[in-house]
Image: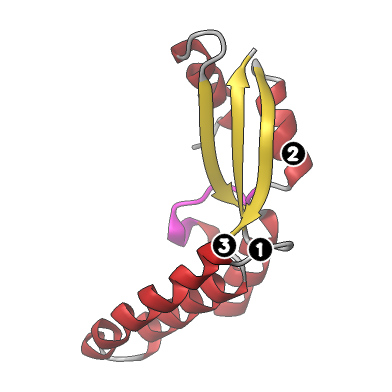
Amino acid sequence: MEDDGELIKVFSQSLKKGGVLYLATPHERHTKRYFRRLGLKYESKGHVREGYGKEKFEALLSNNGFTLNQIRNTWGLVGEGCEELYLLSLLRLPLVCTGLICPFLTIVSRLDMYLRNPKGYGLIAIAHKA
């Protein structure tokens, strides 16, 4: 999405007053670490920007008619490690090998849902239309 502010305005126009918006996005920390280490360009995963920090994400929402209820980090070390192993297997191993390890990585990455992620690689925001 090129114009993130315009998209948030459309969400605001689509919701009734008090309506709830739930958004998930990569944290800027995620793309800086992840893409540079694997030597990929941002566009290779469909992203047009490096991600958002908490302050930038909160400002984007509040400047476009939303009041933030909660924002938190997600996608911690376990989930991030599993995604990196998955992508490395796609880049370096035969597809059959990737197919064999993918179910294992999926199960292990679910541990991430039960762990607190003080420095997660994603952000989740819950906001309501003011």
Closest to the observer, 120 or 88: 120
Query: At 71% across and 23% down in the image, what residue appears?
Result: 62
Q: Which quarter of the figure is the C terminus placed in?
A: top right
**Tag 1: amino acid:** Arg
| Mark with earlier residue (1, 2) | 2
Query: At 46% across and 82% down in the image, what residue appears?
Result: 85
Residue 107 percent coordinates (x, y): 38, 76
Question: Which residue in the structure is indicated by mark 2?
Answer: 56
Query: At 50% across and 72% down in the image, what residue appears?
Result: 111
| Mark with earlier residue (1, 3) | 3
Q: Nearer the viewer, mark 2 or mark 3?
A: 3
Q: Residue furthest right?
A: 55
Residue 19 percent coordinates (x, y): 51, 17
Q: Quadrant of residue 97?
A: bottom left
| Mark with earlier residue (2, 3) | 2
Q: Main secondary structure of the magenta part?
A: loop
Q: Residue 75 bears which disc, if any?
A: 3
